[in-house]
Image (cartoon, helix red, strand yellow):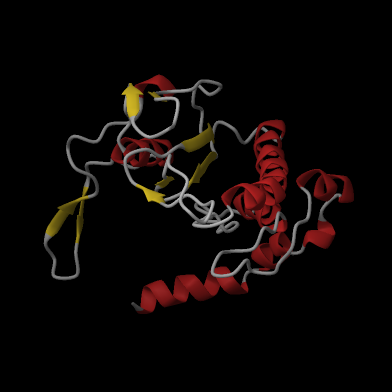
């Protein structure tokens, strides 16, 4: 643990990280292209704060291997449609700018952008004009990583309730990310008691259409 702590403190105290977090160093035109949003949390959700997306790109350029951004509140059990009408435009602007930036800076072979939630939403609207949790169908947006992008893989019925063709398991999405990182998704790691555990099951495979 001492080694892990030392590495963590080295990351936090390096000037490269401090510079990456300082958006005053960024071209104002680029900041406007990303949009700004707000640092205020939305209930129990993360803020719609597009500066986070720009900071993510800057951290990658500073040497970070993996950056996670918690963005927005999408647990719309009530008033789903007014909420999305207000908040999706900021999301759309920020994600589009990030992906454009990755390609414009020549990072698209090395950097994967993955936009993903943990489950989908019910095709049936509830009595509060909301949509509840729905495990059978979800979607993910992948860009960069040297992948063959610009395609839709898989399809659902017209309500988005069930898969009608080419289902992609979430483990295959994870296998694709590991592949892009240069990590064997079937390699073994040790748990705390020293037992070997495979990162992903042997059935998980990178999505062939993307490679």
User: Which residue lies at the image location 81% right of the left edge and 43% below the top edge?
Assistant: 33
Left/right of residue 191 with respect to residue 79 in the rendered view: left
Q: Quadrant of the C terminus?
A: top left
Q: Residue at x 44, y 31 (%)?
A: 159
Residue 74 quadrant: bottom right
Image location (x, y in percent) of residue 114 = 50, 42
Give the image location of residue 185, x and y in percent.
28, 41
Of 131 and 32, nearer the camera is: 131
Count the numbered circles shown.
Answer: 0
The residue nearer to you, when weighing 207 against 157, is 157
Left or right, 170 with respect to 49, comes to left
Residue 40 in the image: state x and y as whole percent: 69, 69
Name the foreground residue: 83 vs 28: 83
Task: Name the residue at the bottom extreme.
Answer: 2
Evaluate whether residue 144 shows in this view: no
Q: Quadrant of the N terminus?
A: bottom left
Q: Is residue 27 above or below residue 14?
A: above
Q: Residue at x 37, y 38 (%)?
A: 137
């Amino acid at each position: 643990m001492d080694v892990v702590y030392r590495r963590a403190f080295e990351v936090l105290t390096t000037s490269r990280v401090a510079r990456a977090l300082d958006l005053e160093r960024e071209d104002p035109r680029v900041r406007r292209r990303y949009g700004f949003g707000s640092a205020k949390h939305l209930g129990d959700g993360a803020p719609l704060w597009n500066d986070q997306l720009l900071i993510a790109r800057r951290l990658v350029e500073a040497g970070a291997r993996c950056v996670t951004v918690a963005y927005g509140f999408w647990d719309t059990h009530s008033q789903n449609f007014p909420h999305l009408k207000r908040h999706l435009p900021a999301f759309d602007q920020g994600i589009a700018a990030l992906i454009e930036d990755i390609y414009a800076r020549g990072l698209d072979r090395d950097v994967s952008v993955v936009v993903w939630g943990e489950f989908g939403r019910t095709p049936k609207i509830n009595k509060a004009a909301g949509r509840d949790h729905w495990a059978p169908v979800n979607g993910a947006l992948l860009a960069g990583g040297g992948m063959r992008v610009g395609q839709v893989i898989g399809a659902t019925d017209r309500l988005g309730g069930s898969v009608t063709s080419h289902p992609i398991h979430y483990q295959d999405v994870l296998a694709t990310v590991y592949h892009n990182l240069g990590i064997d998704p079937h390699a073994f790691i040790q748990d705390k008691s020293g037992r070997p555990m495979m990162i992903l099951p042997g059935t998980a495979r990178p999505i062939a259409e993307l490679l």
